[in-house]
Each structure stands twice: as structure tokens, then as C-alpha cells.
Image (cartoon, grey):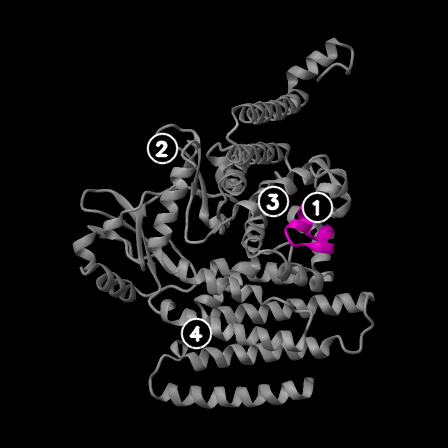
Amino acid sequence: MAGRLLKVSSVATAVFASTGFYLYNKNVDLNDLSIIRFGRAAAMTAVISYDYLTALKNLQYGTEEYWAVKSKLHRRSAERLRELCCANRGTFIKMGQHLGALDYLLPEEYTSTLKVLHSRAPQSSMEEIKQVIREDLGKELGELFIRFEEKPQGAASLAQVHRAVLSDGRTVAVKVQHPKVQQQSSKDIVVMEFLLQVVQWLFPDFAFMWLVEEAKKNMPLELDFLNEGRNAEKVAEMLKRFDFLKIPKIYWELSTKRILTMDFEEGGQVNDREYMRKHGINVNEISQNLGKIFSEMIFVNGFVHCDPHPGNVLVRKGPESNKTEIVLLDHGLYQVLNQDFRLNYCKLWQSLIRGDMKGIERYSRQLGAGDLYPLFACILTGRSWKSVNTGISQTPVTQSEDVEIRTNAAQYLPQISELLNRVPRQMLLLMKTTDLLRGIETTLQTRASSSSFINMSRCCTRAIARHKMSKTKSGTRRLQISLSEHWALCQIGLYELMLWLRSSALARWVYYLLGCLPYPN
């Protein structure tokens, strides 16, 4: 098989090289041509596949040498994949960023290598930006803005953001799509689908076709900036009770499918601990409020922001209130959870928090995990099976446990692939969101804090009670449901108060007076 693959790759490389040489002489931008992009991707796929077919051939599975060689193999393959993404740009970078966010699903060598793609996105020239604005808004740049900064505030895989000032003096952020992404994305997805099918044929355990299925569904939505604007307004209305959450206002008269104009929001990235220290921002408060936002999205509303990487979550002291605020950006990718899925997910998390093993098995199976429910529980929580058995709210995260989980991601890759192909499609982006939030908590050093479980418990209780209310018209039954909900929320509140008292200086003095503790220092 390796010999056959080598012959195919040699022919593909020769065709790719000769075609590229011809077009170069014709002064054509090679990167815009589908044949070039396909040839580059096919050649790199062949090289990576050949490496996997041969590098471990004569090594005994499970030995120290086997795992050491495999780790190096993962690393150089990830580096090759990263270079391919940077060369083909656009959709390829977006896919690489998605893979880099799956910390607890893919080997560490891949995720750590691909994470840098968030800072390696290409920039469009100023002339290209002016052309997009001219085509979509029908006016020159100077007619729309009194100032427009040429250097982008940030560049991503699909677009870049410029700071500008309107004629009335308001400062706005103008998000402009890279001009060639739209026409290239659908062709790029076809290329990825074909190459992943080839890889799956070579390596039957590699079952990652769900990546392409998700890209097919989500890429058109992410490329429609009007859809992003509607999502921003919807979530702002949905979460308006959180006064610490800020969603940029959309300027519809200056927005199209390729341009989104919104209020310019200041702030530091949520993983920037030094920024928070300088501005007197409490990391525990940020972590707690972030948990409130996403628990409400997931468990209560079923409308979930699926790309909360640190560049999309800013923190600051409010310019007027001086209170800590969270600014949520980039609303292009949301997952809508259907009611049955959302309720089973609520009940599963309640079971995980309590350590209810029967509930964990039952609701994991209902979500499609089957006999792989222990692996499913570990992936969702980012915890070991031992911690899941104890109850994840009862056991703190340790460094050794985190290393164990990441190591298992490499060892159980075939089972993880099988699991990801079993569960509902809604679960895939939800897992990505959970992994990104877990990464933020790890940076802030607030992983598995009691406040996050308390927020989740409250939201799960409210969601389940709301569902029961919708299923009955009996006044007596509705009263029973309401009383049961309030009693459960009261218990959660008492538990939260107990935790606060246990950690407070006041409690230590009370315990001292009762003779329970030595004199407090």
C-alpha cells in the first residue's frame, strides 16, 4: 500500500509542479486556482499518510519507543498540516483553527501546533478592502467614514477588522470579508471531503468525516455577515438580564453579506492575566460570569456561541460604571439545540455533577454514546473516569489528571473518532465550545471551581422546570413544579452560602469561638 501511495503522490506532485510553472509564466496568482490548491493539499496528504504508514511499521505497539516515535510523528504531521493551512488560507485556516481547539479530543501535538493559526491568518491589502466596500456599499471609503485605519485591528481566516469613525464622530469596527474566500470556500470543502475519504480508506480507524459535514453546513452561515448581525442582536436580547455582558450594536445601513459595521469595543483578551491585574479585574468574577453566560445559552435557551476563543471574549472595566464587563464578539457561528437534546444534556450534567452513575449511563446513551458512555463522560468534563465516579464537583482538577486526559486523547483516538460519528451533530460544536471555555478557565486557573457547577445546576434546574411547565395545563401541577423548582434553587443557594462561609475569615472566627479550629492567624 505504501508503494502504491508513493507512486500516486509522485505523479500528483509532477502534475502540480508542471501546471504551476506554466501558470506562473502567465502571471496568474497561483493561490487562486483550484487545481493548485487541490494539488498542494493532495501532495501534503500523501506525504503525511505515507509517514504514518511507514514510521511505526517495525515497532512493537505499546512500548516506550513506540509512543516516543508516534509523538514525533504526530508533531511533524501537525506542522505539515499547519503549513498547508497557511499556504491555502481561508477555509483551510478555519478548519485548522477548529482542530486546534479540540484539546481533549485530539493528541496534544496537533492542538498545540495548530493553535498558532489564530495569529497566522492572512491580511487583505487596502486596495482589496476598498474594492469590497465599493462593490457592496456602492460608495468610496471617504464618503462613508471620516477616518478609516489602514492597519487592521485583527485578521482572521475569513475577514479582517478595521477601526473607523463615522461622520457623527462615533467609532466603529468594520469587519470586511477577504475578497476571494467566498468563491474558494465551496471548492475547498469538496477538496477536503475527497482527501478525508482517501485517508479514511487508508486508515479505517480515522473517522473524521464529521469535520467536513460540519464545514458544509456552517461555512455558508459564517460567510454571511448579515446572519452574524442577526445572531448578535438575538443573543443580546436573550441575555439582556446580564448587565455585565456587552454585545456590539450593529449598523445595518453599513452592513452587507461581506461587510459588518458595529460599535468598536475596547478591552483585553480574556486570557490576558496581566491586563486584568493592571486594571483591577477579578479573574474569579470573570470566570463566574462567563460560566453564567454560557450555562444560560446552553441549558436554558439552546442557542450557543460556538467560537469563544480568547480573541472573541474581551474583558474590561465599564467606561461609565467602572464595573467588570465581558464583551462577546464574532457571532457568525451558533448552534441551535433542539429541545430533546437540550433536556437530555441538562440531565446528563446534573448526573455528572452529583456522580450519579446510573444517570450518566442513561443520558449518555440517549445522546448516542452507547457503550462508549464512560469515554463520552470523560470528554465532556475533561476529567478522569475516577473523578466522574466520585462526582466532578467533589474533586479538584490536578495537573497529573489533566496530563492523563491529554495522553488518553492520543491513545484512544480510534474510539474518540467512533464516538464523534455516533453522537448527534449538535454535540460536535458544543464540544468545541466546552473545550475553548475549559482552556480559558485553565489559563485563569479557575478550572472546576464550585461557582461553575453552581451556575450549571441552576440553569439545568430552571430549564427542566420550564419544560415540565410547558407540558401541563393543570394549575395544581404547575404549582407543584414551581414549588419544586424554587426548593431546588433554594438548596443550591444554601450550598453556595455554605461554601462562601467555609472560605471566609468570618467563618474561621465563628469556628474558633465554637472551639472547632485553632486560633486564626
Considering only vertical position in the picture, is 184 above or below 12? above
Secondary structure found at label 3: helix
On the image, the x and y values in percent for residue 106 come to: 64, 60
**Is residue 376 part of the magenta span, yes or no?**
yes
Q: Earlier in the sequence, mark 4 or mark 2?
A: 4
Q: Which residue is mark 2?
A: 319
Distance (Cα) linking label 3 and label 4 = 35 Å
Q: Earlier in the sequence, mark 3 or mark 4?
A: 4
User: Is residue 87 among the parts visible in the rendering?
Assistant: no
Camera-side mark, 1 or 2: 1
Q: Which mark is residue 362?
A: 1
Camera-side mark, 3 or 1: 1
Q: Toward the viewer: 301 or 402? A: 301
Q: Quadrant of residue 201?
A: bottom right
Q: Earlier in the sequence, mark 2 or mark 3?
A: 2
Task: Bin the neighbour count of mark 1 within 10 Å (Cα to Cα): few under 14, some 14-19, many 20 and up.
Answer: some
Secondary structure found at label 1: helix
Q: Quadrant of the N terminus?
A: bottom right
On the image, the x and y values in percent for residue 457 come to: 61, 33
Q: Which mark is residue 47?
A: none
Distance (Cα) linking label 4 and label 1 = 41 Å
